Amino acid sequence: MKKVFCIILVVMCFMNYTEAQSFKKVKVTLKNGLVIKGTKGMIADESISFTSDNQLKTFPLSDVSLVQAKKGAADKWALGCGGGCLAVNVIYGFSNGFSGVDMYGNETNLGSFFLGTILETAVGAGIGYLIGIITDKEEIVYIKHSSMLNNFKLNFSTDQLTKDSPKFNNITLAYRF
């Protein structure tokens, strides 16, 4: 049992690692300020690829300043809630010989039990899907790391109004966005 648990744990860790750089919906902001929304985003070492307007678009990460993405939690929530409902009904079915009880306490037949199980699983999956849509927020998954110090510009200048007037030293500090 311990071996099976360890194998399942390792497989789940690798599944999360392989999905770490793929996203269901992306919003890419380029350096020039253009924002492009797309689906099926994949961030590789040097580029980002995604589908926008039914076309595959690829940009080098050097041209990208920000990538926001949604993980697509709705599918996972639907699978979890629907699967949970199905598991509860299967366990209940095994314990009661695949016959259920209606709201009046009367025993039901096998067909009614399966129909109820399917309906309850579908409702659970629908509720899970709605929970996933509500909780799936955009997250920043890539941001161009630029030093803020590179954006500051320090200027020194000397002014003299006339040849005989004193010199004024000017120091200006500018920040470029």
Image (tube, grey):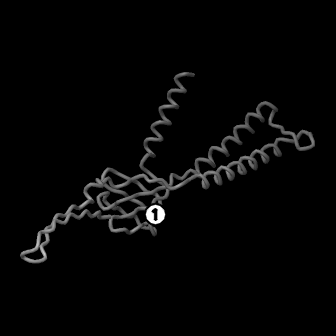
The answer to whether residue 143 is left or right of residue 165 is right
Residue at figure coordinates x 11%, y 70% from the top left: 166
Q: In which quadrant of the rendered image does the N terminus lie?
A: top right
Q: Residues within 10 Å of mark 1 (few under 14, many from 20)?
A: many
Residue 42 at x, y percent in the picture: 41, 54
Residue 163 picture quarter:
bottom left
**Residue 98 versus residue 87: which sits nearer the camera?**
87
**Amino acid type, label 1:** Gly
**Residue 114 versus residue 49: which sits nearer the camera?**
49
The answer to whether residue 109 is left or right of residue 94 is right
**Residue 70 versus residue 167: which sits nearer the camera?**
167
- The local secondary structure at tag 1 comes to strand
**Whether residue 163 is situated above or below residue 85 in the rendered picture:** below
Residue at figure coordinates x 65%, y 54% from the top left: 130
Residue 177 at x, y percent in the picture: 32, 64
**Residue identified by numbered label 1:** 38
Residue 96 picture quarter:
top right
Residue 165 at x, y percent in the picture: 10, 74
Residue at figure coordinates x 54%, y 53% from the top left: 72
